[in-house]
Image (spheres, rainbow, N blue to C red):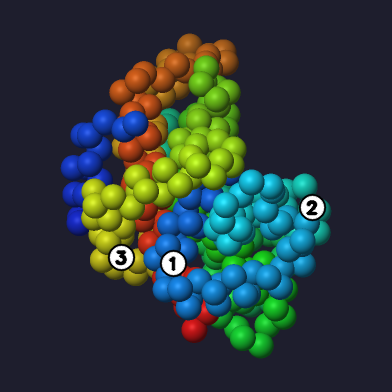
Amino acid sequence: MHSSARSLPALFVAVVVGMMAQQVGAWSESGHHLVALLAFDDLTPDEQQKLLSILAAHPRYAEDFTPPEKISNADRFRIGTAGYWPDIARKLPEYNRPSWHYQLGATLTMGEAAELQVPETPGLLPADATLETQELYIAQAIELCRRTLNDETALPADRAIALCWLGHLVGDAHQPCHAGSLYAAGLFPEGDRGANSIPTRQKNNMHALWDGLLGGGYSEGALDRRVKEIAAPEFAVASEAAMTVQDPLKPLVWLAESRTAAVDHAYTHEVLGPVKATMEEGGELLEIYFSDAYLKQAGKLAQLRAAAAGKRLAAIWREGIK
């Protein structure tokens, strides 16, 4: 027995279901660059320059945003890096905020509720929260960073940091494995850590596999191709649909969509079958080998989620540069 998150809004799910039937050719370095570039391309040239001006006040601008040699477009490298920067900050204790990247709670539960230890859903953003606050989760962190970026009286460095976190967390909120965990009695009573605890032959674990669906390390040429792919009309339909749902700029809406996407396309029978068998038989969960059909559907969904994330990120960045 299992329960799932609420359904995606009707228009958005209609677009997703229609496109999932097609074959494919959230997120690693490439994925975060991609979402940021999709958002950047949605801005006007004047808005783009304002965004770059805010980013230039970043306290690690010289260290982390200087393009390597042979980069043909420095501005696009910097904006893409803004979306990826919170992962760079994992190695910088003064900037690392581990819990900001995900949401607590259950995407799926299996077994008796009394045997599970599902944490409470994070509440509202604490009134005294700042960019130094560690104990926040993704929806709270996005609210904090929107407030900071929109505040023209805030320190320029804080606005630049907030810009980067927004570029990153909007993308993370659209990655199904960042929205919650599978809680399974006797196997994952405290959750599967956003699928990090599900071993796979591809990419070591299921979370890593989903993170890599939009590409791996940075490659300017590969990113240019991916941006063009997702700028195509078929994905434009998905990005426009993402802005027609109720409260399209609320992270809890994105997280609800991601949980539904996880139930429908991440935690399929290829995962839940082995999980159920292990719950019944005991022992450790063996490595899962995903079928080509699973990977094709996952890849298409990743592109759809990136298209939605890029459109929504553009609107949020636009708010902060008025």
What is the residue that sits farthest to the right in this orientation?
93
Quick one: label 1, few (<14), some, or many (20+) residues within 10 Å? many
Q: Do the residues labelled 1 and 3 touch (CB within 8 Å)?
A: no
- Measured as percent of width and height from the top left, residue 57 is found at 71, 73
Would residue 320 be found to the left or right of residue 165 on screen?
A: left
Disc number for residue 92? 2
Instruction: From the viewer's side, name the closer residue of 146 and 278.
Output: 146
Q: Which residue is drawn at 62% across and 75% down?
A: 53
Amino acid found under the numbered disc labelled 2: Leu
Q: Can residue 27 be seen in this view?
A: no
Label 1 element class: helix
Q: What residue type is labelled 1?
A: Ala
Instruction: Categorize mark 2 by other alpha carbons within 10 Å: few (<14), some (14-19), many (20+).
Output: few
Whether tag 2 and tag 1 are in contact, CB under 8 A, the answer is no
Proximity of marks 3 and 2: CB atoms separated by less than 8 Å = no
- Label 3 – label 2 distance at C-alpha: 35 Å
Q: Mark 1 — residue?
A: 314
What residue did someone put label 3 on? 243
